[in-house]
Amino acid sequence: MDGIFGGFEVFGLALLALVVWVLWSTIKIVPQGYNYTVENLGRYTRTLSPGMHILIPVLERVAHQMNMKEQVMDIPSQDVITRDNAMVRVDGVAFFQILNAAKSAYEVDALEHSIINLTMTNIRTVMGSMDLDELLSNRDQINARLLHVVDAATEAWGVKVTRIEIKDIAPPRDLIDSMARQMKAEREKRAQILESEGLRQAAILKAEGEKQASILSAEGDKQAVVLEAEGRREAAFRDAEARERAAEAEAKATAMVSQAIAEGNVQAINYFVANNYVKALERLAAAPNQKVIMMPLEASSLIGSLAGLAQITGEAFGGPSDGGPTRPAPKRPRPSVPSA
């Protein structure tokens, strides 16, 4: 009996294990972000999306568990020869996402390895068609060309390549030193050009300043000449006005003397003669070639003439104080007068 019960226990345990295995292989729970491919007797039949699914025991099984999230992989570094025969070492990084789990599982073997090799091959192709200067300055263009080529090639695998970035471009050490010397020479050249431009601009500004100074000086001289001419014109106008007034005064005096002579005033005649006499002496004394002149002079006539002049002046301003006739001055001997 003990043997029989022992055999039933072993059979029960085996049956329980079989039931657990059948349930485990029948009920599948797919986590979020994953897709499972199902094979029926080795043939792909369907894809399981996230959630709980029931499979046919023994006949169906999960073949591949595909990660549907965006993934990143490093592109190993490799040596690339550029179009101008420069050797550079390049590495990068690629981002991709599986869009079709069945194609990714059955259209290509070792998906990530295939993407890495495809990217490395196209890096050599794209960068090998460019010069070193283009390679160092056009990373965005390189990334765009690589993305276009690799994405088109992986479309048949159910994969979307979202980005490809070149991480590092490392030329050889001697090339780096040459580039440093070239950059230094270029900067020195730009500095010399800027210095020359500065000197040129300074010379232009200096010449412009001198030009403006000359213009202002000429304007000042012109203004001074104009003011000087206006001053001379004003002086000439005033001189002419003074001469005109003097001539008017002399004409008026001559008219008064002529009127007095016409009325028979002897004193007016004496005034006229004495006035002309004095003027003649003034002109004679002002001559530059005169030294000493001895000439007879009738002093009493001159004094009488002056007395007549005083008489006329007194009459013009109210007459003599006593109302009587003016007595002639006594006669004196004529002295000799030296010319001044």
Image (cartoon, rainbow, N blue to C red):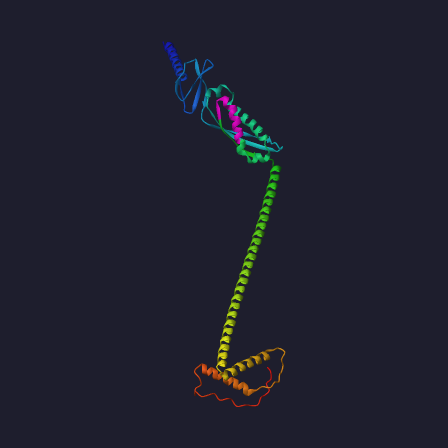
Which residue is at the front of the view, 108 or 149?
149
Q: What type of secondary structure mainly makes up the magenta span?
A: helix
Depicted 335 relative to depicted 222: above or below? below
Q: Is residue 88 above or below residue 190?
A: above
Figure disc tally: 0
Measured from the top left, where is residue 132 in percent x and y? 59, 34
**Within the image, what quadrant is residue 182 found in?**
top right
Q: Position of residue 117 (x, y in %)?
A: 55, 25
Residue 22 visible, this angle = yes
Which of 208/256 is in front? 256
The front one of 106 and 63 is 106
Expressed as whole percent of the image width and height from the top left, the position of residue 125 reads 58, 28
Q: In the rendering, at what x and y percent does residue 128 appear?
A: 59, 30
Determine the image quadrant of residue 190. top right
Which quadrant does the N terminus fall into? top left
Q: Which residue is depicted at the point 43% across and 15% down? A: 60
- Using the rendered view, name the quadrant where residue 168 is placed: top right
Residue 79 in view here: no
Task: Tell me, yes or no, whether the highlighted magenta stretch contains residue 157.
Answer: yes
Say which quadrant the C terminus sits in: bottom right
138 in the magenta segment: no
Query: Magenta residues, as a range?
Result: 143-160
From the viewer's side, name the closer residue of 282 and 199.
282
